[in-house]
Every structure is written in structure tokens, then in C-alpha cells.
Image: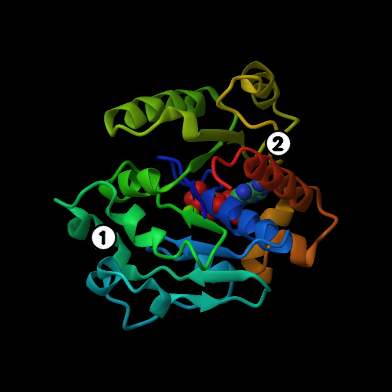
Amino acid sequence: MNSIAVYSSKGGVGKTAAAVNLSYSSSRRGKKTLLCDMDSQGAASFYYKISTRGKFSKKKFIKGNLQKFICSTHYQNLDLLPAHFSFRNLDLVLDGKKRDELKTLFNRLADDYEVIIFDCPPNMTLLSEHLITAADQVVIPVIPTTLSIRALAQLMKFFDKIGADRKKMRAFFSMVERRKSMHVDTVKKYRKKKVFLKALVPYLADVEKMGVSRAPVAVTMPGSPAAIAYDRLWMEIWKRRVRD
Ligand SMILES: Nc1ncnc2c1ncn2[C@@H]1O[C@H](COP(=O)(O)OP(=O)(O)O)[C@@H](O)[C@H]1O
Ligand SMILES: [Mg+2]
């Protein structure tokens, strides 16, 4: 099982858009995939037209038996663990638990899924720590601005602080606008750094339209440069996997 967390301490950088489209690419390319919507706001669940379940209990969740909460999507090979409003309190449940608590929990699904993708909430919380620990690769969308590069540097320190291996960081440029010189310059300057993946995702209305279509870009607009970009990104992430 390959576990991938789409994470950033910042909100609005394209985490959910990436998690939704990457999980779709993974499933289309034949991998049995589970997308876990770990953000209590439930945007990934919304995009896949799956509503959160009323009876979900974070206590039951943490005790195991995740299968009970998993839903199938409209797409082959792709299941979803929907978010729940109570996830905002997962931090309280995780308090005092070992940092690999969630890793152990999700490892129980190893026989069922080849790929697990976590759509993480922003901020540097206990839940983030657990998800980073549970992931083999942490995919980090970075909007090409000076401040975002600074945030990435802070994230490296956060990895050190929580004892996570920096080698699993995979940054990619998100929402890239070629008409903005700061974007072009920042991409040029940092793209070759080890932490960055080559594939980048352009800023395109096609991604925003997912809010209306409630489907991955590749479903409604397979020829869109955004769909192609996410698929390339997926292939690069898959190539850099650490397990078989
Ligand atoms: N590549 C992109 N091009 C244009 N809009 C985007 C792109 N990626 C994300 N968005 C839009 O930006 C907003 C924030 O994206 P989202 O994926 O929800 O960010 P996060 O999960 O990091 O908070 C959403 O309205 C989304 O539709
Ligand atoms: Mg999000």
C-alpha cells in the first residue's frame, strides 16, 4: 500500500483539487484507490457527490474498523472515506496517543487498497502530524510566490520537529499563472530543487468548475490542460513511490 498525504500548512493552495484529481488518475490507471477526506469541511467528499454520514463517531473511527465508513464513488477502483464535522476534534482524540496511531489504523486497509490518498486540513496540528507520519509521500502544493517558498521552508522545520523524514516531501507548483512574472521567476528558480516535482498545475477555470460539475476535471473535460497536468503529476508521484 502506498500512502500519500496532500498537505500544506496553508489553506486555499489547491490541496483538495489535487487530492481529488490525483485519486481519480490513480484509479483510472488501474490502482485500487481510497481517498480519505480528513478535512472536516468535506470539500473532497462534496466533489465526489458523497455526503458525510450523520452517525459517524470519531471515537469509533479511532478504534478501527474503517471499512464501515468507506463509500464507493461513481468511478471504478475508487472509494472514499468521507469527512465528518467531528474531524475538527480529532486532535483531542489523538492527544496523548502515539504519533503512529493513524498509520497503524490505516495500515489495516493494506490488503484492500494499493493507494491511499489523504486530503489534509491546513495548519500544523496534531492531526497533521499523524497524517504526515502515516504517509509515505507528502505532496505539497506551492503557489509560486516568495511567501509560499518561505512557508515551505517552515514546513521543513516542522518535519524536523515532529521527527518526520524530509525525504518524503514532494512539493509541486500549484495555480501557476504564466502572465505573472513572480510566478514565472519563482518556478524557474526553484523547480530544479530536489524537493520539487517537475509537473506543475496551471491556474485554470476548469479546476474551479469542479465545484459545479462535482467531478474530477478529467471526467468532464478530459482534454483540459489541467486534467493532463494532474495526470502527469500523478505519474511522477507514482514513479517516486517508496514501496511496491
Ligand atoms: N489549478 C487551479 N486553477 C484555478 N483554481 C484552482 C486551482 N486549484 C484550486 N483552485 C480553486 O482554488 C480554491 C481553493 O482550492 P482547494 O483545492 O480547495 O485548496 P485547499 O484544499 O488547499 O484549501 C477552490 O475554489 C478551487 O476551485
Ligand atoms: Mg481543502
Helix, strand or loop at label 2? It is loop
Pointer 1 and pointer 2: residues touching (CB < 8 Å)?
no
* Residue at position x 68%, y 55% in the image: 207
Helix, strand or loop at label 1? It is helix
**Residue at the extreme bottom:** 55
* Above or below: residue 123 compared with residue 223: above
* Residue at position x 66%, y 20% in the image: 192
Tell me the tag on residue 90. Answer: 1
- Going by the numbered disc 1, the residue's amino acid type is Leu
The mark total stands at 2
Earlier in the chain: of badge 1 and badge 2, it is 1
- Going by the numbered disc 2, the residue's amino acid type is Ala
**Residue at the extreme top:** 189
Within 10 angstroms of label 1, few (less than 14), some, or many (20 or more) residues?
some
Q: Distance from label 1 to label 2 (Cα)?
A: 33 Å
Res. 133 in view: yes
Which of the 4 image quarters holds residue 151? top left
**Residue at the extreme left:** 96
* Residue at position x 69%, y 41% in the image: 201
Q: Position of residue 60 (x, y in %)?
A: 26, 74
Instruction: Name the colouring of the figure.
Output: rainbow
Q: Position of residue 131 (x, y in %)?
A: 37, 49
Q: Position of residue 141 (x, y in %)?
A: 55, 39
**Residue at the extreme right:** 223
Locate residue 119 relative to residue 57 in the image: left or right: right
Please tell me which residue lies in front, 30 or 84. Answer: 30
Locate residue 46 relative to residue 164 in the image: left or right: right
Locate residue 78 relative to residue 226 in the image: left or right: left
The residue labelled by disc 2 is: 199
Q: Position of residue 230 (x, y in %)?
A: 70, 48
* Above or below: residue 178 compared with residue 65: above
